[in-house]
Amino acid sequence: MHSPLQFMITFSYFLIFFALLSSNLTQQTTLISPVSKDKHRNLFTLSVYLKTPLRPTKLLLDLSFLFPWTVCADAASYNSSSDHYIECDETFCDYLGFGKPSLLCEDCYYSNLTTSHSQCPSPSTMICASWPANPITNVVDAGYVLVDTLALPTLNQSTHHGQLISLSNYTFSCAPSYFVKGLPTGVTGLAALGRSKLSVQSQFGSALTTSHSLAICFPGSTESTGVAFFGTHGPYFVFSKSNKIDLSKNLTYTPLIHNPIGITDDFPISPPHNEYYIGLTSIRVNGQHVPINASLLTINEEYGIGGTKITTRIPYTLLEPSIYKAFTELFIKEASSSRFNLTVTNPVKPFKVCYSAKGLMVTKKGPKVPIIDFVLDRENVVWRIMGANSMVRVKNKKVDLWCLGFMDGGVKEKTSIVMGGKQLEENLVQFDVESNRLGFFSLLTSHHSLSCADFKVTDFAKHIK
């Protein structure tokens, strides 16, 4: 299955390492990947082509983890003619950032992930180690670094999917087969899209010598497909009837905030400074400010706690307990006003605030409930959350409810506000690490009745079960 690859260990070679890309690349190349929403776990997936020959592959879309990983510990789960190990040099393995300082390399012959000794060139071969993690189950285990071919389609404005561009030195961690537990059906790995040098967009950006920018339109339905754009700040064209609209011109920008402390909310090898923090300064419900202790909204420089970050690991936004209490009390008060005339009913788990669906007006923007505004670095920089992003339908034989899709984060959560997947749906979000800013636009607020499906991207891995 595997054969070793010997590397010259210099930092300059690291740049060449990612520049070995197939031909026909230009600095104007924009790569795309279909984005889908899982109907059972409300997680997002990214579709790519992997291995030789190239095969459609589903990966978990993750905005936080340090590096990508794929289940490939045995020949039955991973079969490619182009994959290879990285032979150990501790300086280089440490620079790659996959392993722990205490275990940068391991003996290929005795690795718990190499299922047959024939995969190793010799009993004494040392290879770069890694520590992949499943962010949904919080399982961490030993693995090793692998290199293989990954490809994405180029953006063609007439046919949407253009030629495939291959990254022949795509570098990732090989994970045990049980790592797929808790992930959407058909997913065999994780696409790391955080702020690290080994993120998918950084690897392609280095190889293309172009922007490391990433933009994602998160679909709001399991039946529709969104899109991720790699290597461009725009244009991002959607197609509405006879109109062709560039949504890059509609983006509102706010600075990305750096968390200097390498702690984590989940496991010790994914420090928050690889995650996307933004400077939320206040929350409004129906125009009224939620009373919040301002110190909770800033990152503590000594301990790295507090602040606001964006994640795709949870379906609903988490709020620090005192913020959650004040927020829900104000929401209930405003929803009961004469403008909405809503009365809370018995909630269903995991929700705490629910309303009967009977008589509740619903439009494309969702149920008619108080609008929630996340006010960012300036009063006029607002992330607006309409009913479609704030409320969750719970319908079965016993109940038919709309419930507020925000959760009490509890006392153990280190980040005060963690924006979840529900609040990202039908939003185009640009992660521009080079300019240290985040751009966002809610398609629900558009006058053209747009959705992420209007990018007209087809999921080539949709058939994978």
Image (tube, rainbow, N blue to C red):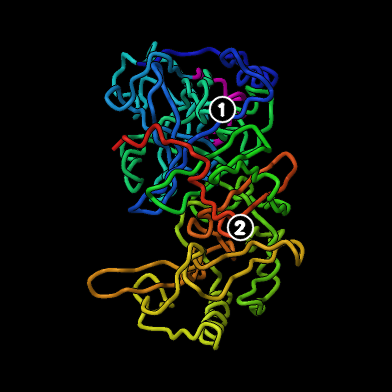
- What number is the disc on residue 368? none
Residue highlighted by disc 1: 156
Figure quadrant of the N terminus: top left
Across and down, in percent, residue 400 comes to: 32, 73
Secondary structure of residue under mark 1? strand
* Residue under the point 31% across and 43% down: 185
Q: Which residues are magenta?
A: 86-101
Q: Nearer the viewer, residue 236 or 134?
A: 236
Across and down, in percent, residue 12 comes to: 70, 19
Which is in the foreground here, disc 2 or disc 1? 2
Give the residue type that dot 2 points to: His
The reply to whether residue 269 is visible in this rendering is no
* Residue under the point 32% across and 45% down: 181
Q: Is residue 225 left or right of residue 109?
A: right
Give the residue type that dot 1 points to: Asn
Question: Is 204 one of the magenta-colored residues?
Answer: no
Q: Nearer the viewer, residue 240 or 251?
A: 240
* Residue under the point 55% across and 60% down: 418
Vertical placement of 326 versus 225: above or below? below
Figure quadrant of the C terminus: top left
The alpha-carbon separation of the residues under discs 2 and 1 comes to 26 Å
The reply to whether residue 334 is visible in this rendering is yes
The reply to whether dot 2 and dot 1 touch (C-beta < 8 Å) is no
In primary-sequence order, the first of circles 2 and 1 is 1
Question: Is 88 one of the magenta-colored residues?
Answer: yes
Vertical placement of 181 versus 3: above or below? below
Residue at the extreme left: 397
Total number of numbered labels? Answer: 2
The image quarter containing residue 248 is top right
Residue highlighted by disc 2: 447
Secondary structure of residue under mark 2? loop
* Residue under the point 49% across and 39% down: 456
